[in-house]
Image (cartoon, grey):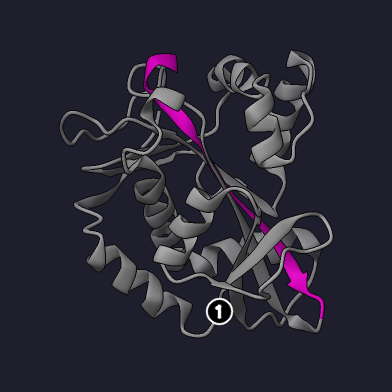
Amino acid sequence: MLINEHSAISTTKILLVPYEVHHVPTYHAWMQDTSIQEATASEPLSLEEEYAMQLSWRHDSDKLTFIACLPQPQAANPALSGSQDGPERMLGDVNLFLSYSEDDSSAVVGEIELMIAAKSLQGQGYGRATLLTFLKYIADHEVELLEEFEREKMSAGVVGLRELRVKIGEGNSRSIGLFESVGFEALAEEANYFGERDLVLDRGWHERVREACERYDLGEYCEVKYR
């Protein structure tokens, strides 16, 4: 998506920046790890394919992505590409896929993916900070996100983003617990055919995001220019 091409989100706990070309080598290195491939249900790509994927993420109207980085030492506007989001500060990524609801063509659903790839920094709260920051961004920019999605799909009449979903391997209890802690609920007691747990944040999801941000103290949230 183009909506976040020049926008970063800075909080006291995390920095989210748009996925740019200079991030690709580090991202590609992450995705060679077999444990990450398993956790994300991904196949390894060549570096050339990874560059093509980055370009797709930038221009496809149904995909929104940010790279999660260590927080800025102090508030800065703008966030500077290559200095505050260099390889040594990159943590992982967070993504949103938009699609029309299977049972209601006037509603859109969003599927979230979250990865903290830097293993030495896992389990330190960066996953929750990334997720909450991303959810707040989606809630604040729902109208603009849907406008870009609809414009490309040449459709009209969508009433809103009905729900957010996530699919997580049933053995990834830490990730399941993270999403449940911010209000996502399991659609079924058992994993699906692919061994994944389906979780959803639906009824009143905007309010539940606000409550989660307050409960876990998201910290100072600021959208800044990215260049």
Q: Residue at x 40, y 28 (%)?
A: 227
Q: Is residue 210 above or below residue 145?
A: below
Q: Left or right of 142: which side holds 48? A: right
Compare residues 9 and 206 and report the one nearer the observer.
Answer: 206
Q: Where residue 2 appears, x then y in whole percent?
A: 59, 45
Compare residues 70 and 84 and report the one nearer the observer.
Answer: 70
Which amino acid lies under the numbered mark 1 shown in the image of this protein?
Asp
Q: Residue at x 48, y 49 (%)?
A: 174
Q: Quadrant of residue 198?
A: bottom right
Q: Left or right of 146: which side holds 86? A: left
Q: Left or right of 37: which side holds 114? A: left
Q: Residue at x 35, y 41 (%)?
A: 126
Q: Where residue 20 appears, x then y in whole percent?
A: 55, 27
Callout 1 crowding tier (Cα within 10 Å): few <14, some 14–19, many ≥20: some
Range covered by the magenta-colored residues: 87-102
Residue 92 lies in the magenta-colored region = yes
Q: Where residue 26 appears, x then y in whole percent?
A: 55, 17
Compare residues 203 and 192 and report the one nearer the observer.
Answer: 192
Q: Is residue 19 above or below residue 188?
A: above
**For the stretch drawn in magenta, what is the main secondary structure?**
strand
Q: Where residue 42 appears, x then y in whole percent?
A: 75, 35
SS category of the residue bearing label 1: loop
Q: How many marks?
A: 1
Q: Residue at x 68, y 73 (%)?
A: 108
Residue 89 lies in the magenta-colored region = yes
Residue bearing mark 1: 202
Q: Is residue 223 above or below residue 78?
A: below
